[in-house]
Image (cartoon, grey):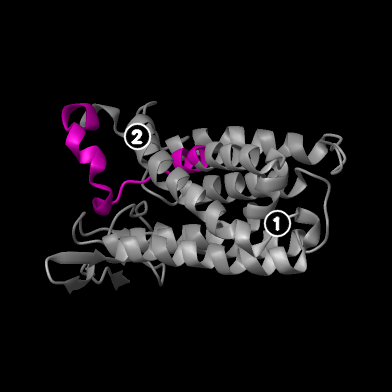
Amino acid sequence: MLIYPQFDPVALHLGPLAVRWYGLMYLAGFMAFLWLGKARARTQPWHGMTAVNLDDLLFYGVLGVVLGGRLGQVIFYDPGYYLAHPLDILAVWKGGMSFHGGFLGVLVAMWVWGRKQGKRFFQVTDFIAPLVPLGLMAGRIGNFINGELWGRVADATLPWAMVFPQVDNLPRHPSPLYQAAGEGLLLFILLWVFSARQREMGRVSGMFLIGYGVLRSAAEFFREPDAGIFGLSYAISMGQWLSLPMIAVGLWLMLRQAPPRTQA
């Protein structure tokens, strides 16, 4: 059985400025997005993307992630708290970013960017889908360093069961690391391989939705559930409720007759 190492959430101090690991993980995710995106634009011309597009696309994506992720946390998980403490909505350095909110924010941002560039919505989302999971992995590692989103109580004989002293003295699953491995690394490999050849429009997006929804739902069985707007439940968590529509839409995208790429 392991003991959570109680990381200092601040990576370094630059004068009065505290640079936090959580922020550095987001930066790592954005840099991975940019690097992998330029590789895809160079090797997969059917997307109609160029390296020049990536900087602008990343800017829109960052706005979608930060604004949507924070608003998702406020609306889906802690509306009562933030209604009583509205200034804490701005305290993103403390953590508290909802993936599903960030996901919706990115969808809106990609729609706006696509409209400006004359590109179809699924043309854009098919391109970015394989670029997202490594950023998710970095974010979950940031959660682990912050000592948040700890897992459910585990069997003490589990070799990697971990005591989080800031919670209690019970052995628990290190669920942020499960999510980093699942919806991060595993999903990245799945999407990178699946998107290696040209697919019908919407298929890569559909695979992302199904893959994330299934892997997130599986990880929720090992993660201490958040209360959310539907209340606290160990049967179906808030994260699982929010993942169900993703799986449903993903299945629809995979099974529908896709429009031709040449269609305006």
The type of residue carrying mark 2 is Tyr
Which residue is the site of mark 1?
Answer: 49
Q: Position of residue 4 (x, y in %)?
A: 27, 68
Q: Quadrant of the C terminus?
A: top right
| Mark 2 surroundings within 10 Å by alpha-carbon count, few (fewer than 14), some (14 through 19), many (20 or more) | many
Which residue is the site of mark 2?
Answer: 77
Is 199 one of the magenta-colored residues? no
Q: Which mark is residue 39?
A: none
Viewer-closest of 133 and 34: 34
Relative to 1, residue 49 above or below: above
Q: Position of residue 98 (x, y in %)?
A: 40, 43
Asked if residue 77 lies left or right of residue 137, the reply is left
Report the magenta stretch's main SS.
helix
**First to last magenta residue range:** 82-105
The type of residue carrying mark 1 is Met
Q: Residue at 64% of width from left, 50% of height from top?
A: 211
Front disc: 2 or 1: 1
